[in-house]
Image (spheres, rainbow, N blue to C red):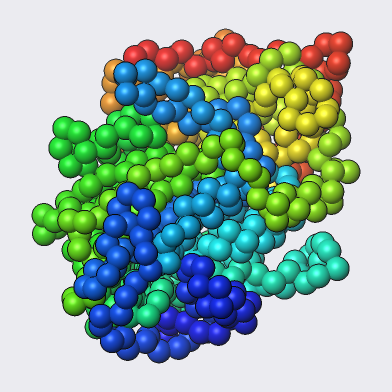
Amino acid sequence: MPATSPAHPRRRRRTNRLLVTAAGVLTVGALAAAALPGSASAGEQGGKGQGQGHGHQHGRYQDVQLLSFNDLHGNLEPPTGSSGRVTELQPDGTTKTIDAGGAEYLATHLRQARKGNAYSITAAGGDMVGASPLISGLFHDEPTIEALNKLDLDVTSVGNHEFDEGAKELARLQNGGCHPTDGCYTDKTFQGADFPYLSANVLNEKTEKPLLKPYWVWKKKDVKVGFIGVTLEGTPNIVSAEGVKGLVFKDEVETINKYAKELRRKGVKSIVALIHEGGFPASPNYNYDCDAPGAGDGISGPIADIAKNVSPEVDALVTGHTHNAYVCTIPDPAGNPRMVTSAASFGRLYTDTTLTYDRRTGDIARTAVKSANHVVSRDVPKAPDMTRLIDKWNTLAAPIGNRAIGYISGDIVKDGTESPLGDLIADAQLAYARTLDPETDLALMNPGGVRASLTYAASGAEGDGVVTFAEAFTVQPFANTVNLQTFTGEQLIQALKEQVSGSNEAAPKILQVSDGLTYTLDLTKSGADRVVTDSIRLNGEAIDPSASYRVATNSFLAGGGDGFTTLGQGADDLVGDDDLKALEQYLTANSSAGSPLAPSAADRITIVR
């Protein structure tokens, strides 16, 4: 049965410490079943509030601080390039770029934000791990779980990337234990997460029961707040088939509404949904007004539809997945205002939301809810405990990560419909595939698999222009294999059209293509017609629908991922080594200190707008 919680010994020690010091959050774990607590007596005095939105101090109302973030993706060290910056709108209408992120700074900001707020909860919207830099990814994200424990994270939903290594590995991150293949990395056994992962809409296919706890209840004195966690229903389309084998992903809205009713029946009326699905803001500035000209007008995409349909019994939505920043007031189905937030990604922002709890009703007074995103700036002291954690894991990773594997003459970025880095990766996979089968014709790379740009400026002591293994790992951290399949020309054309049709019609996923493949993408048209069939050429020659073509992709695409069902229907499969090795071999073979690799022109796809 879903539980409010019990008895996680590490969490209990932390809770006892907080009781003694009277310094903050009273929490309980959720790793074992227990009955929900009954209603506490009304009228107890809460902690003193500080700062905007924390002014209610006594009597009927109690301000509860909700700190939240999402899509950390194991970025313990400050992210580099555009991944480590946010854009801030200034009062005069200009914008300012701020360097942001890094667990040492995130810890300091969160700890400062909690001061003076005795009723404070820290929650996350999923993708805490997966697609992580080498410092975490090399160790199956154990370092990130340890960091989140130190951050005093109370609860998180499960994101799609938590399934990158499958349900068993997710269970290990929750419960602890050494990795089944790689074993223990230090002399201490990995302890797992002190916080519960919530997965209400992910069911075991056989038992039809939730894979993990669907909800969790935070309680301090007579104040109770329930959290329901869901991930996006479309997760099977964007992770490897092996990662979600035996699982069923249910509708987010139906699931949240189901468990909201259950929580209400158990006496929990203040409810927050942690949803790993997001939206697309009207502005790239993290502090833009999402409610201009009207409530929620500054946000579109899946989360807008979800928010409009989630039960009014839910008081706030913490979201993620799209890596965007927004704080919006989207009316619920009853027409009441409800806060919907997202804190971008990689630990660059955190959201501070005030939930005003009404002791008389046990519910949140919605009209009093306030929320804002705050920059995790790097002008504050580093948290010493986080520095020690990072140093420990960097020491273990250094012999592998610091190795130079190539040289570049400038930034090779992942940005754009077709990107220079996408071209580079596709060329690397084509070159590698031809060592397996010299008849390979082309390679296709999914844009979501390119996780970071290669920057010319040194990230450490390696020197400008040097590409280290750690940097390449950050670009391609999934351990996909390079797969070869044979397709007809007709299938190849269909696969290219799937970039802008079917499940990808509303949000196109433009494949990165290897040298020799060219075509026109006409964005003035709609659906599959946006790929101009007559323009598709391979080495200058039109694609013959009846001919056979040998195509290299990664294993994710070869399984039909990202809505490319045709790429899952090839023949004569040949599975090679991992895609990171292909990139490493290409960089080593095609660059040197005296002859670095230059960014491509990214002109293989002609775009008409």
Residue 92 visible? The answer is: yes
Front-lying residue, 504 or 400: 400
Q: Where residue 351 sits: x, y (%)?
A: 41, 48
Q: Is residue 396 above or below residue 356?
A: above
Left of 84 or right of it: where is 609?
left
Q: Quadrant of residue 344?
A: top left
The residue closer to the viewer here, 304 or 428, is 304
Left or right: 120, with 176 as reference point: left
Kindly indicate the quadrant of the structure image that contains residue 148. bottom right
User: Residue 442 at x, y = what percent?
Assistant: 63, 26
Which residue is at a point 81% across and 70% down the rendered structure image? 188
Q: Quadrant of residue 189?
A: bottom right
Outermost residue to the left: 335
Q: Residue at x 54, y 37 (%)?
A: 377
Q: How many marks?
A: 0
Q: Quadrant of the C terminus?
A: top left
Residue at position x 51%, y 52% from top? 112
Foreground residue among 463 and 411: 463
The N terminus sits in image quarter: bottom left
In the displayed structure, would residue 439 be above or below residue 189? above
**Residue 590 shows in this picture:** no
Q: Position of residue 327 (x, y in %)?
A: 32, 44
